Image (cartoon, coloured by chain):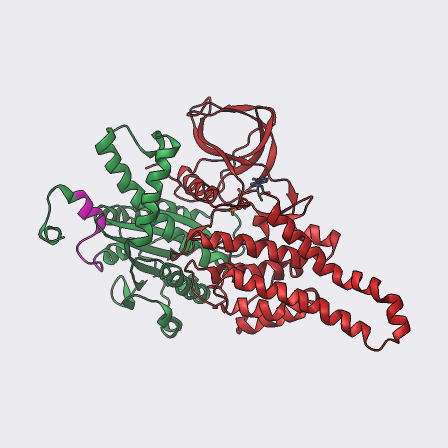
Chain colours: A red, B green
Amino acid sequence: MKMNQTWKKQDIELKPGMSLNGKWHKFRYMIKRKLGSGAIGSVFLCECNGKEYALKISDNSTSMTMEVNVLKSLQKVQGNRLGPSLFDVDDWVTPHGIKYSFYVMEYLKGETMASFIKRNGSAWIGVFMLQLLEDLERLHQSGWVFGDLKAENLLVLSSPPRVRWIDVGGTTQKGRAIKEYTEFYDRGYWGMGSRRAEPSYDLFAFVMVFLNLYFPKRFNKGPNAEKVLYAKINEVKALKIYSPCLMKAIQGKYQSSAQMKNEIANTMYKAQKTHTSSKQTGRTQKVRTKTKSPVIVETGGIFLLALFYYLSSLLVP
Amino acid sequence: MKKGTLKQILLITDGCSNKGEDPAATAAIAYQQGITVNVIGILDDDQTEEPEGLHEVEDIALSGGGVSQLVYKQSLSQTVQMVTKQAMTQTLQGFVNQELKQILGPKQSMEDLDPEKRGEIMEVVEDMGETCDLEVLVLVDTSASMHDKLPTVKEALIDLSISLNARIGRNRFCIYSFPGKRKDIQKVFDWSPKLDAISTIFPKLTSGGITPTGPAIREAMYQFGKKSLLRSLRDEDEPNVEEAGY
Ligand SMILES: Nc1ncnc2c1ncn2[C@@H]1O[C@H](COP(=O)(O)OP(=O)(O)OP(=O)(O)O)[C@@H](O)[C@H]1O
């Protein structure tokens, strides 16, 4: 049987400018540069018929086939795309006769959520939360759970800013054992639940994605893991208004992403309202009328921005 | 499809065997009996290169039809469950490959099929991996150098049972340590569907001076029930009584 006995990294180095031909479908891909590498295989930017794609290649045909199967299932989910769309699946035989498997997908050009928020401010937190929860809801509705949800597997595309998933390798059918996970994001590791694929598994990881933004070096679970999580959630100012929702998600209290999304949206709405009224009280009538509109613009900004991008994500196919 | 039980030995060690027969040879015998042997070699924090003594790790897994991995103790939990799952896939895929050869001819394997067909077959393999029953015998080296690693091993094993118990199929685990007091191996924890009860037993493990890996694997082999998946699959042409009523 040909399979890696260990999964030590065996990076394939494809030089920019070289081409490879698919064995089965005969497409020709010109390699432009390396985009990165993961536990299995490397990802390259390539060109085929004048269009750019991301090409993932590996000698581990089994794992590649499993990833492709997930991507294919995700293509069937209606609406906005979940994960990069799949273009081609093929094999490549080197001139020396070594066989590799590869697949070609949509090239997603973006930046990490951390760098985006660093530049544009934490007002975007709420936007990304709503976008992610909406995608998760659609994924869950179609019988899947993301599994390995983590900062490295998310990319923010620009104009309009939209979070997208890149690595869907951990995506698992509901009710099965989570295929792939990363300890920091895994509720099993934190002693907060099972590794069975259910919506609440993703919602736990979802919270950790946002904690990871503010604790990029991550943190240890210590003897009382649950307490550590609560303390960290409450420590971050930018997450303050969401903390009741985040706590609930950590405890596995949401049955669905839609439920959590509604509560987050409500929280944003309420925060905007109380913020506005607290600014209004204590000011004289005169001053208030003078400053009323700028105050609303300022405090309502977060919510309106969120609402705008949320709505536009619904409208833009 | 007939549901079978996968049988695995998971050997956790940090050094080379120094007593009894060649562990790679006993692993080969176990594999013949339908038991896969996986090996995890724990590196000390100051070991940067692959140490000589741990060369054996790969050889044992190779002849035992399993998966091996060297790892620092910090990443033990994730490694233990990945090795176990990967070995399951590997075993099941091996079986599927054999079936394919029957259908397509001796020179054909999964890699020779076009990607679409490969995808369909992989789906079957994944289904089997999710639903089959699994028996894991954990064989822990308790020679002196392992002493400070045992708490981490314990954590990793509890974590393994969390991972595997999320599957649809059933699991049974047991733990043996070696060297035993008078025997080659010593029972630490009897066959059970969960491992969370091991917290109390682990601290009591005593460490010895020798590392009889080969004899330990041989003994471990006898702790499984008689029927195994590979066996039953190989003998499929001669249906036995157990399957007749199915
Ligand atoms: N469709 C894509 N568009 C643009 N960049 C991509 C795309 N897919 C992957 N990449 C880049 O390639 C890198 C490697 O991706 P890959 O999916 O192989 O693994 P990973 O997510 O890093 O790790 P692992 O496989 O261990 O989970 C990513 O970090 C990302 O930067």
The stretch in magenta equals: B222-234
Quarter of the picture holding the N terminus of chain A: top left
**Image-quadrant location for residue B147:** bottom left
Taking the image as shown, residue B132 lies to the left or right of residue B243, namely right
Residue A11 position, x and y percent, is 52, 37
Q: Nearer the viewer, residue A228 or B75?
A: A228
At 90% from the left edge and 71% from the top edge, which residue is drawn? A287
Quarter of the picture holding the C terminus of chain A: top right
Q: Nearer the viewer, residue A222 or A64?
A: A64
Residue A177 position, x and y percent, is 39, 56
Residue B138 among those drawn in magenta: no
At 27% from the left edge and 28% from the top edge, which residue is drawn? B107
Taking the image as shown, residue B127 lies to the left or right of residue A148, namely left
**Image-quadrant location for residue B5:** bottom left
Residue A240 seen in this snapshot: no
Q: Nearer the viewer, residue A302 or B186?
A: A302
Q: Quadrant of ligand 1?
A: top right
Residue B86 position, x and y percent, is 38, 48
Residue lying furthest bottom in this view?
A282
Residue B225 among those drawn in magenta: yes
Vertical arrangement, residue B118 with respect to residue B220, above or below = above
Vertical arrangement, residue B222 with respect to residue A163, above or below = below
Taking the image as shown, residue A147 lies to the left or right of residue B68, namely right
Residue B78 position, x and y percent, is 46, 56
Q: Nearer the viewer, residue A285 or B59?
A: A285
